[in-house]
Amino acid sequence: MRAEAFQVLRRKPVEGYDISFLITNYHCEDMQKQKLIDFIVQFMEDIDKEISELKLSVNTRGRLVATEFLKQFI
């Protein structure tokens, strides 16, 4: 099951959540429930991994910039 197969039913997230899924009765009847659950879990794991990588990248870049900036005072 691929993300492209999902029809976008809501683009605006639910208040208090960064990401929300609208799963209708159609999704539950048409798709295998376990595969639907697996897709959502895998999607969230992938997003979490990407966010962690971005945080590491930002921290690394920040250290490099700070090091270069502080070199002028040494």
Image (spheres, rainbow, N blue to C red):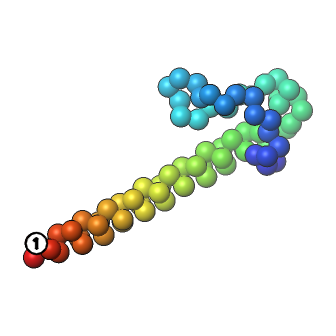
Can residue 34 be seen?
no
The spot of residue 67 in percent (x, y) is 23, 70
Can residue 4 be seen?
yes
In the displayed structure, does residue 20 sit left or right of residue 38? left
Look at the picture and state if 59 lies above or below 28. Answer: below
In the displayed structure, does residue 4 sit left or right of residue 10? right
In the displayed structure, does residue 51 sit left or right of residue 12? left
Pick the quarter of the image with the C terminus: bottom left
Identify which residue is drawn at 24% across, 65% down: 66
Disc 1 on helix, strand or loop? loop
Identify which residue is drawn at 58% across, 49% down: 47
Quarter-of-image position of residue 65? bottom left
Look at the picture and state if 67 lies above or below 41. Answer: below
Look at the picture and state if 43 lies above or below 71. Answer: above
Which one is nearer the viewer's eye here, 64 or 19?
Answer: 64
The spot of residue 62 in percent (x, y) is 32, 62
Amino acid type for the residue under numbered disc 1: Phe
Residue labelled with disc 1: 73
Which one is nearer the viewer's eye here, 54 or 48?
Answer: 54
Identify which residue is drawn at 79% across, 39% down: 6
Q: How many marks?
A: 1
The spot of residue 16 in percent (x, y) is 50, 25
Residue found at the very far left of the displayed protein: 74
Crowd band around label 1 with a 10 angstrom C-alpha radius: few (<14), some (14–19), many (20+): few
The spot of residue 64 in percent (x, y) is 30, 69
Residue found at the very far front of the displayed protein: 72
